[in-house]
Amino acid sequence: MKLSLVIPTYNEKENIQKLLKKIQNEFKNNKINGEIIAVDDNSPDGAGKLLEDLKKQYKNLKVINRKGKLGLSSAVLEGWKIAKGEILGAMDADLSHPPEKISEMLNLIKNEKADFTIGSRYVKGGKIEGWNFKRKLMSKTATLLARVYTKVKDPMTGFFMIKRDCIKNVQLNPKGFKILLEILIKGRYRNVKEIPITFVNRTEGKSKAGTKEIICYLQNLIRYLPYKKNVIKEFFKFALVGGIGTLVNIIILYLLTEKLGLYYILSAIFSFIVAMTSNFTLNKIWTFKEQIKLEISKKYIQFSLVSITALLVNLFFLYIFTEIFGIYYIISQILAIGIALSINFLGNKIWTFSK
Ligand code: GDD
Ligand code: MN
């Protein structure tokens, strides 16, 4: 099976030569039938010109020259359009991704162990070298948000391979940086495997990621909701469970106080615990369809922490809406419950029940 590896090369003149050499070595050493498709957007640093020259040296190198900077995702898609391989791949040009992992990723697909392989920084054995705290935090946050859609540990990486068939007739939106997440959401693949990589920060040139990419990413996260009807369904189940929990809470509060003569504050604490436990159980087996026994005590603690956080968020917004915005307190509470419910759902979806 042939591999078509796309490399977006905007302003990467200083990195291209070294990278191509490494990839060609990897191809040769592992007898890989591969082509490289460099997609350049008229780079001001002259990367496109250099690539044209390199074409003479490398017979398996194709170059696409576009008029101007049209974005990373669209570059990858454009490259795949002229690809001849049954397996499509993507990799950054700045030497952040290790070409030595190409054969491992490819072989898993060739041997039918996977139809989608991802060079991952966030599985055991993977790591990031040379990023500052801010960049790491941003990457982690973005990755966490993506958990709503995928269980893959590194859905933000730019290094991956997939069987062409898996994205045949799939409409991909070329906006932004995160083409992989979109394929994870929309693609028709059976099994994905993550291979640990060490991501090394570039030594030459500058990153092209910026505020524009962050905004685009957040927009995309909302845009993807209809593709995961499942998530919407889970949300409504979660809300319903919350409703049942409230009822349980009030009934037990009433019974303990009126029938057993318990002090009402004590009853309230007790009924809160019972309601939370029933919420946990229902969400575990019904909303998120997990086996009840799977890591039950750890998850119970996680669930409790999220629930208590949501309660604090609820009180916080109730106070703000009522005291600062002067909204009638019942209306404030309805709004606050909406916010707290969303946070409660998100927290449990991406943390407690993420695997
Ligand atoms: N043709 C083209 N056009 N190439 C582009 C464009 C563009 O508009 N924008 C970026 N590239 C190329 C760069 O030249 C580089 O080879 C690659 O895309 C990644 O861009 P970087 O600027 O190095 O991005 P990064 O290192 O900040 O982000 C990378 O790592 C992230 C992981 O946290 C990318 O791989 C992201 O996709 C990835 O999410
Ligand atoms: Mn980079």
Image (cartoon, rainbow, N blue to C red):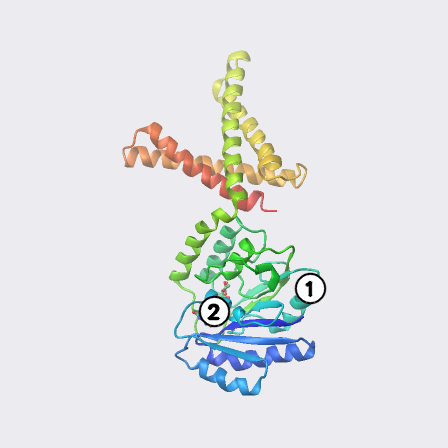
Q: In what element is the residue under mark 1?
A: helix
Q: Can residue 118 be seen in this view?
A: no
**Residue 169 position within the rendered picture, expressed as x and y whole percent measured from the top left:** 54, 59
Residue drawn at the location 66% of the way across and 68% of the way down: 106
Single out the mark in the foreground, 2 or 1. Answer: 2
Any mark on residue 69, and which?
A: none
**In the rendered image of this protein, does residue 29 appear above or below residue 88?**
below
**Residue 108 position within the rendered picture, expressed as x and y whole percent measured from the top left:** 69, 64
**In the rendered image of this protein, does residue 304 appear above or below residue 97?**
above
Q: What residue type is labelled 1?
A: Leu
Provide the residue designation for mark 1: 108
Q: Is the residue marked 1 within 8 Å of ligand 1, measured from its CB? A: no
Residue drawn at the location 40% of the way across and 64% of the way down: 210
Q: Is the residue marked 2 within 8 Å of ligand 1, measured from its CB? A: yes
Asked whether 157 or 2 is in front, the reply is: 2
Q: How crowded is mark 1: few (under 14 residues within 10 Å), some or many (20 or more)?
A: some
**Residue 256 position within the rendered picture, expressed as x and y whole percent measured from the top left:** 54, 17
Q: Which residue lies furthest to the front in this view?
A: 169
Q: Which residue lies furthest to the right in this view?
A: 111
Residue drawn at the location 53% of the way across and 20% of the way down: 252
Asked whether 184 or 145 is in front, the reply is: 184
Asked whether 48 or 59 is in front, the reply is: 59
**In the rendered image of this protein, does residue 80 appear above or below residue 186?**
below
Q: In this view, does 204 lie to the left or right of 331?
A: right
Q: In which quarter of the view is residue 157 placed?
A: bottom right
Provide the residue designation for mark 2: 75
Q: Is residue 182 visible?
A: yes
Q: In what element is the residue under mark 2?
A: helix
Give the total of numbered labels. 2
Looking at the figure, which quarter contains the N terminus? bottom right
Q: In this view, does 177 lie to the left or right of 111?
A: left
Q: What residue type is labelled 2?
A: Ala
